[in-house]
Image (cartoon, rainbow, N blue to C red):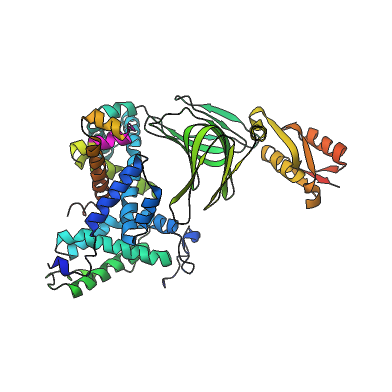
Amino acid sequence: MSEAQSPFAAAPGAHEIEAEAAELLERRDFGEADEAALEAWLNRSPAHRAAYWRLEAAWDHTRRLPALQTQAAETVVEAPRNWFLLMKVAAVLVVAVALGVASTLYLSAPRDRTYTTGIGGHEVVSFADGTKIELNTATHLRARMTTAERVVWLDRGEAYFEVKHDPTHPFIVIVGDHRITDLGTKFLVRRQAGRTKVALLEGSAEFSVANVRSRTQSALLMPGDVAIGTANAIAVTREPEQQLSRQLSWRKGLLVFKHTTLAAAVAEFNRYNREKLVLADSDTGALTIGGTFNVHHLDDFTKLVQLVLGLRVRANGSEILISR
Amino acid sequence: MTEARDPTSLEPDLRRPDAGSAVSDVKDWFVREVLPLEAMLMHFLQQNWRNRSDLEDIRQDIYAQLLTAAERGIPTQTKAFVMRTARNLLIDRIRHEQIVPIDAVSDLDALGLAAEVPAPEGQVVARDILRKLQVALDRLPPRCREAIVLRRVEGLSRREIASRMGISEKTVAEHIANGMRALAGLIFGEAGRGA
């Protein structure tokens, strides 16, 4: 074969590109990636992107190595049902032996756990590593807490995190395309349609978003920062401590308003109650109100609305209509 | 793309033949739909191309063409599209090569390209990959495997792995980078291993 003559053996060859991709991925895995350089490299050609994405996808699969160990433990407990399963068990055991010492840690590793709260629900989950997650109303999250990785997926709702920092096992919260990597932190994450809101109370965390170019955009959050990530951008503002703590009042079962529009207050109450408040029109919604309320005591709120704002409140099936 | 849109597709937002595709969509398509076909692709290339040392470059060229096409619009019939791209690329190569591999064209027209086989359910794919991962790990050189397990299972830093294995950090980096490449070949390609 006259390899050098081939118009298809585009320089550099597949071998070289893949070697470079592996070096970049290796650095990235150890947190040493130069994102700009990586992006420039990926932009060189589709071949570069293909090579990198392919290695990255394979490497992502190796996240399952601990799961493999878990599966081994769980499969062994069950009585093998047929020879195929028996062979599978044998194969898993071979790997378990190959993994040696590391595997013994993993034989007791838990699977992904899911935690759910209904409307008005509130739950605190404590993990063995000292991390605490507090779920707000109508929230669903999955947690994979092993000695290899600590990953939480916030599928719906809002949760407050107090993370025990461990430099070798970063704590990651994944919210759709967004990712919060904890660097020793207390923070609040809320998932809303098309956006993720993160409020950082203590420590620091990295908030990143997979943008349209599929590369990550990220922001390092400091205490007081409130970040909102959309499909392709992150905006960060800083809020005074008081305002931040107000966002956490749900942990005590309270809603705290200060110069809050009626529309926003009603939306908040409706997160926690099946009985929904409804505003007659947008003018009514623009009125502002302040005060501290129990999340479930709609009466207290509607009484105040009647007294202070002079509005009419009328029950209508499972709705409470507020109008002028 | 001129192909008909698949009316049964569960991901209508991925199919945007007119608007051009976001890179994240292209990547998603490539990872979820193309890479799982790599074993089949490599099998096809091996059967139809004599010189094994070309396979890695051919695969790269095919992937580059697929991504270029997907950037204009995500193909709907991925499997047929991949095989057609592979076939066309082999034919082009044969035309341009000075020496034509004797049996290069043997199988090209015998390909069943028409029918898109429905993708297996995610569960099946996941189990399949888990199985491949077990096998792949077994096939890695021992030191390479050890470095990868220390990284992935124990989550050690490069420095910790180096001290645990009694080697330099640079060597750890090489083991891991080599492991990443080998694993990709074993998990996706199997047949595409080595050069």
Magenta span of residues: B146-157
Please give the name of the residue rendered at 34% of the width and 48% of the height, measured from the top-left corner.
Answer: A56
Quarter-wise, where is residue B67 in the image?
bottom left
Q: Residue at x 49, y 67 (%)?
A: B19
Q: Quadrant of residue B117?
A: bottom left
Which of these two is toward me, B48 or B194? B194
> Is B149 included in the stretch rendered in magenta?
yes
Q: Is residue A166 magenta?
A: no
How many numbered discs? 0
Residue lying at the far bottom of the rendered structure: B95
Residue A86 at x, y percent in the picture: 26, 36
- Vertically, is B85 above or below A161? below
Q: Between residues A110 and A81, which one lies in front from this camera angle?
A: A110
Horizontally, residue A189 falls left or right of residue B98, namely right
The image quarter containing residue A262 is top right
Give whichever of A138, A146 is nearer the camera.
A146
Give residue A312's position: percent from left, percent from top: 86, 43
* Residue B192 on image: x %, y %: 21, 54
Residue A289 against residue B184 in the figure, above or below? above
